[in-house]
Structures are given as C-alpha cells and as structure tokens.
C-alpha cells in the first residue's frame, strides 16, 4: 500500500490581551504542542500524549479534528481517513491559548495535506481560525509568532506581526487550577465608562512602543481597566499575585482569560537570559511564586506555527507551509 501524506504541525502557546489591549494583542511563547496528522485509507485514529492525555476526547469532537474538518470543507476536500497524534505541552484552561493552538494546528494540517492546494494561504488560515476560535487575539500570534495586533473587518480577521525587543523575557506563573474562558468572559460588563476606554486606547498604544522599542515603559504600558479587575472574583489568587508583582515594579498581566499570570522581565544593556543579572531577575520573580503554582521562564517564539513533513515521511510534503524548525 502506498504511503499517504503526513505532516507535523508545531504550534506555540500564546498570551493574549497583554493588559489593556483586550482582544487585540497577543504574544507567542516558547511552549509548543506538536501534532502529527496523516491521511489514511479510512476511519479516524486520535492519540493524545502530554497535557490533556486521558481527558481530551479521541474522536470527532477533538478540537484539532474539528478544525481539520472545517478547513477541509472550505477547501472542498474530504480525505478518506485521518490519523492524528498530538504531543501536548500547553496546559488547557490556563490562559495559554491551548484551544487556539489546536484550531491552528488542525486548519494548517488540512491546508498542507489537501492535494489541490499548492501553498498555504496565510490570510485564509487566519480568517478561518479566528472564526472557529471566536476572535483572533490568540490565533494571530500562534500563526505568525512574535507579538501581534489583530482586528476584524467585514471580510474577516487580519493581523500584523511585531518584532519584540530582545531585552524582554516572559515569565509565566501557572496555577494548578483552571478557568473557563466562557465563564471569564461572562464577568465582563456590556459597556465601560468613557474614561476607561480612553485609558485603554492610550495604554495600548504605549504597549506597542514598549514591546518593540522601549521596554522600560512596560509597567505603565500594561496598565488595564477593562477586564482584569472585573474577572478577579473568579480567580482571586491570580488577582493577588498580579497586584503583588505590579506593586514590586514588574510589568505583569493576566494571561488571556487567566488564571495564569504573565510577567515581562526586562534585561539590561548587553544582557541575555544567560547572564547573572538576568538569572537574578528571574530568581526574584520565582521567589514571588505562590504555593501550588509553577514559575516558568520562557522566550518569545519569533516563528509561530511551523509545518514540516512528518519524520519518516519526507517524501510526503516538499516544504514547510509557513517556516522551518530552528
């Protein structure tokens, strides 16, 4: 029997909102899910290892499969069968973009494997992923890498990628508890005072400058009035940690809908993550980690989603869809 096509899709975790840029900004992080997807002669096989193993479904309701089916339908293609093997490092329900990663992986796999598609249409992928996810703030950095600004037009979602200043080191605080994005969004008011809207617009503009040119302004650039305090009753430990970090001068935000908290450490001139001063700064943050939480120093993922031929199937796909592994 001839070997049918197979690809590996690697997708990063993401942190959305970044404080004031609610539903508009996101950051790709150095934590990845890897999904092997193969076309078979029939049926569906789903395997899950790592985060979510034993809890995530292994049938048609698996989010990667659902996204793959939606993309295949849009492309007018129905594969005879499908085999999916997910190796997850992104925890679910923590505000790290696990659902956006799954959606992006499924849509990219369908585009990459469809025999009638010569190359991946990044704009079409972003649009469909945003429709499936509900908004583009997580799928944009997952797809494009770096930091992104995203918005929606009459023709669908659009996004712009920003190169993050290399002095910025993301440090993620991860609790053992989870929080439903639907629940967190339900705590938000239908309208906000005009003064808070003006504050959000100004701080969002400052955030872009701080992320790309002047990280010293990140503490002010991450000030939020739109969503974090409103969601605090659903995650009091996250709210307390956020308040403590910011009181100590750290640019900290709730990651996405929470309950993870993201701190953006800033290195000095000539420093990198391996220098003693940088290590001391990370240790200072680690000392603020609440009991039962995990502190994870990370890096910004500059690449975003990557599609490659699955190991052992090098003749299946001639090149990656969006980039190559470093």
Image: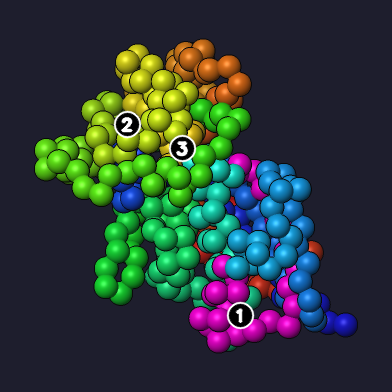
Q: Position of residue 123 (x, y in %)?
A: 40, 70
Q: Are marks 2 and 1 in contact (CB under 8 Å)?
A: no
The secondary element bearing badge 1 is classed as: loop
Task: Quote the CA–CA distance across marks 2 and 1.
Answer: 45 Å
Query: Foreground residue, 126 or 217?
Result: 126
Q: Which residue is mark 1?
A: 114
Is residue 229 in view from this perspective?
Answer: yes
Q: Which residues are magenta?
A: 67-91
Q: CA distance from mark 1 to mark 3?
A: 36 Å
Of badges 1 and 3, the one in the foreground is 3
Q: Is residue 169 left or right of residue 93?
A: left
Q: Which residue is found at the position 24% from the left and 35% from the top?
A: 225
Say how many tags the image has. 3
Q: Quadrant of residue 86?
A: bottom right
To which quarter of the image does residue 189 belong? top left
Rendered position, 272 above or below 321: above
Query: Where 220 sits versus 38, above or below?
Result: above
**Secondary structure under the numbered disc 3 in the rendered image:** loop
Q: For residue 75: magenta?
A: yes
Q: From the image, tell me which residue sits under label 3.
A: 258
* Front-most of residues 55 and 214: 55
| Mark 3 vs mark 2: in front | 2
Residue positioned 55% across, 74% down in the render: 70
Q: Residue under circle 2? A: 229
The relative height of residue 79 versus residue 250 in the rendered view (above or below) is below
Q: Earlier in the sequence, mark 1 or mark 3?
A: 1
């Amino acid at each position: 029997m001839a070997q049918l096509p197979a690809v590996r899709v690697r997708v990063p975790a993401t942190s959305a909102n970044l404080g004031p840029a609610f539903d508009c900004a996101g950051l790709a992080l150095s934590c990845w899910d890897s999904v092997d997807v193969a076309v078979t002669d029939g049926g569906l096989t789903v395997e899950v290892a790592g985060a979510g193993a034993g809890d995530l479904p292994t049938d048609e309701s698996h989010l990667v499969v659902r996204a793959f089916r939606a993309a295949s339908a849009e492309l007018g293609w129905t594969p005879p069968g499908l085999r999916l093997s997910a190796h997850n490092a992104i925890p679910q329900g923590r505000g790290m973009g696990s659902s956006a990663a799954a959606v992006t992986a499924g849509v990219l796999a369908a585009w990459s494997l469809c025999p009638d598609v010569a190359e991946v249409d990044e704009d079409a992928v972003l649009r469909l992923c945003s429709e499936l996810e509900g908004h583009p703030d997580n799928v944009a950095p997952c797809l494009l890498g770096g930091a992104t600004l995203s918005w929606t037009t009459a023709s669908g979602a659009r996004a712009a990628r920003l190169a993050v200043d290399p002095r910025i080191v993301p440090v993620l605080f991860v609790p053992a508890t989870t929080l439903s994005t639907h629940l967190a969004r339900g705590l938000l008011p239908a309208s906000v005072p005009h003064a808070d809207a003006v504050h959000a617009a100004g701080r969002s503009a400052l955030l872009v400058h701080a992320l790309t040119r002047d990280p010293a302004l990140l503490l002010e650039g991450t000030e939020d009035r739109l969503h974090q305090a409103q969601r605090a009753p659903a995650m009091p430990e996250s709210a307390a940690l956020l308040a403590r970090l910011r009181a100590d001068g750290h640019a900290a935000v709730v990651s996405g809908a929470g309950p993870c908290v993201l701190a953006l450490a800033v290195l000095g001139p000539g420093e990198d993550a391996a220098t003693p001063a940088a290590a001391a700064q990370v240790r200072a943050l680690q000392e603020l980690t609440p009991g039962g939480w995990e502190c994870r120093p990370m890096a910004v993922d500059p690449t975003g989603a990557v599609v490659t031929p699955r190991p052992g199937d090098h003749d299946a796909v001639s090149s990656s869809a969006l980039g190559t592994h470093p």
